[in-house]
Amino acid sequence: MRAYNSDITVEEFIAKHATPYDPATDNYFREPFARDTKVGKNSAIYNAHSYHTKVPPEGIVPYILHYTEPGDLILDPFAGSGMTGVAAMMCAHPPFGIEVSPGAKLGARKAILNDLSPAACHIAYNYCTPCDIGLLKREFKRIVAELNEEFDWLYGTTHDDGTPATIQYTIWSDLFRCCRCGETFFLWDVAVDPKSGKVAEKFNCPHCGFHGPKTKHKRVDSVPVITNYEYLDPKTGKKKRAEHRTTPAELAKIREIEAKEIPYWYPTNPFGSDREMWRGGHRDAGITRLCDFYTKRNLWALAAINERIERACTEVQMGLKFIFTGLATGLSKLNRYRPGKYKFSLNPLLGTLYIPSLFGEGHVPYYFGNRLKFIVPILTLLPTGSTIIRKGNAAEMLDISTESIDYIWTDPPFGSNIFYSDCSLLWEAWLQDFTDINHEAVWNKSLKPEEGGKSLTDYATIMTKCFEEMHRVLKPGRWVSMVFSNSDDHVWQVIRDGARDAGFDLSNTISLDKKQRSFKQIKGEKGDENVVGTDIIMNLHKRPRAQVAVQAISDLDETVMGILRQHLEALLDPTRYSDALRTTDSLYNVVLQELMNRKLSNRGLTLPYIDELCRSSFKKIDGRWYLPSEEIRAERTTLEDERSAIEWIRAQLVQHPMTLAELIPPWRKATLKVEDRLEKTLPQLLEENFWHDADTNRWRLPTEAERRQMGDERTLRIRRNIQRLREGKLEALPKDSELLEWMFFAYQQLADHRAVVEIYQRLNPTHLSEADRKKARRLYEFCVTQLPEIDHEDPSGQLRLFR
């Protein structure tokens, strides 16, 4: 198989660079890499070209140095943007700040980068292939010079005094038709506050006053509303920026452009409901072809540049296309405009094909010029070495010989987190080379199997074949480091089963924190999506001995709770650990890593499960979990969040114990402006952090013994079991004697009369002694009288209510 954009084949590359495996002389040995990694995504090299997900090369270098020797051959079966290749070359001179394992030898490694996506291969090729910078700049200037007159026509305008000007960007706004009065209005005019830059979720129709969100109205069109331009001040001779409401002349120019035929080729491939990321919003916006993701003006300019690139000098043609695709999404309608403090920029949401209601149309030649200035210094920073790109299926790498690879680093598709082929559509449209979706490793959510989508089983089948191929090409005793992140336990199990069945041993798992979160990860941290914020790296070992089976867990709750409690107890020293390790997201990763390290199954482990388990046993303050016995102190003295609210209550109770009634008036006064921002009520905060003296009915600071009791394991277990019983999530009822114990616990410890009644309804009194039966009945009857919604004259009604 010929390598991507190369004269040599993959087989020839391997024959030149691979060291044959000889079991008689091989003495390779490495312990698994065991250090968590944190690396930023703001380096110049990382930002040379966007991609849906990628690990910064600085985060890969430590692994390569640990597991390999200079000159070793590395494989990345899911190479994406090619960061593994960059990292392999960086090993000759690791960037400042990278922690190198003791004994690691510096020197470049060789790499084979494989990906199914033509766009990924294109990006990876340019990252890993030297370019004649001088020739690139000359060709670029020639293209711009040839198109200057055409660009002046496309983006020309005038300042308010008639001075010629050039449009820098145009803000387009959705036009809606009111659901009540039928009149039209611009979202820009009714929802955007020009001073604060905030966009209101709900607004008034300017014609009838109807108040509601934009989803209540019918989208009619998208229209330019603001034009930002640059002109030469005739008085000073200096360039100045200004903006105004899009003028009739500018609207007329857009209509003129719309009426003309573009004299160059541009992608007209269809885009419809057969794609996973197609939404009704695309239909409403009139997007039926890939070219419809652009305004006619920007499509014209991009088509003109692309036509010149196709005729450019072949030595730098790929480099010019690298600059072109680096702007292809930002100069489309995907580019969201964020009013206010943010400067205009090319800012589409990675991993989506979302068309915002306010988008910014950037000036194509301006951004191409800026991109060249940005790229040229980066090209001088890129390391050089021996790397080839293979465009193909990771499940069929037959041109890579058996036991020829020294190390594998890879970052495979995360089930249904990202649909790479759809996300790459605009890049691949201009390249006119599309991903073969039949081989894409993905679990479709919108597309059903009968519509061409893939099920979890299909995803598992593809990934299993990929693991088998990785195991075949890797030398015995060597390692695979695989980045993976998915909150769905089914997807995790697919990966674990596939690795095990292929013959890999999972040695350990460690975390990779890329610091900057993706859009979905941010939503996950807020609880809007079940997506984890940090990635897990699984170190897989190819070995000849029998595979140790993953063991099932008899009691998942008990096992996970033990891990969580041990983790939170380790965090009691704030000088050693960050509070960021207390989020649901972090706890999920801790539990997942520990289960994998213990060779235990993670079936049933999800973000919602961790959140539910934590709610039953721990207290949540400002999105972070704490032991019930933990004393939460706030640095702030003003009451503005849960931490400071607890500190405020402590300040009241340190003077003397108080009843709830005594606390309520000063509490309301103190929280007048912030109570809507507090997730918990005053009674909840008291229950979780302070001690209630039943004899005096007053709240006070707990003693050390009482604080330990608040966090007692048995107490927590009974609380959790009562909650699960009431929610119908308890798999099996305990013995009646234990239910009786829960009844008295609910009454004495929780003061929850409803819980007592609900537990009693699940009790079979005939299994109790006569004395216990009487105690249970008396407690039940008393608690029933405390619930005003029950008709106390109708015991059968009580039973109907609680059964």
Image (cartoon, rainbow, N blue to C red):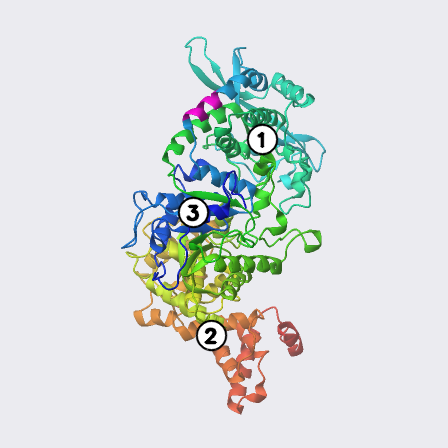
User: Could you classify mark 3 by the number of other residues whose Cα lies within 10 Å: few (under 14), some (14-19), or many (20 or more)?
Assistant: few
Q: Position of residue 127 (x, y in %)?
A: 44, 38
For numbered disc 1, what is the local secondary structure? helix
User: Taking 577 as reference, is 270 left or right?
Assistant: right
Q: Mark 2 belongs to which amino acid?
A: Ile
In 3D space, how far apart are the residues under numbered discs 1 and 3 (Cα atoms)? Answer: 61 Å
Are there few (<14), some (14-19), or many (20+) residues within 10 Å of tag 2?
Answer: some
Instruction: Report, in whole angstroms, how far the alpha carbon at label 3 lies from the one at label 2.
Output: 66 Å
Residue 188, which numbered label? 1
Q: Quadrant of residue 579?
A: bottom left
Quarter of the image holding residue 45? Answer: top left
Q: Is residue 720 above or below residue 224?
A: below
Relative vertical location of residue 564 with respect to residue 580 in this rendering, above or below: below
Farthest-out residue, bottom: 770
The residue shown at (51%, 44%) is 9
Q: Amino acid at mark 1?
A: Trp
Residue count near mark 1 (Cα–Cα under 10 Å), binned few <14, some 14–19, many ≥20 = many
Name the N-terminal-most of marks 3 and 2.
3
> Mark 1 or 3, which is nearer the eye?
3
Q: Is residue 136 magenta?
A: yes
Give the numbered dot on residue 603.
none
* Residue annotated with mark 3: 16
Mark 3 residue element:
helix
Tag 1 and tag 3, C-beta contact below 8 Å: no
Q: Mark 3 touching mark 2, by CB under 8 A?
A: no
Q: Main secondary structure of the magenta part?
A: helix
Q: List x then y, in percent, for residue 706.
A: 34, 71
- Point out residue 406 in the picture as x, y percentages from the top left corner: 41, 55
Mark 2 or mark 1: name the one nearer the start of the chain: 1
The residue at 63%/26% (across/down) is 296
Q: Over which residues does the magenta segment extend?
A: 134-141
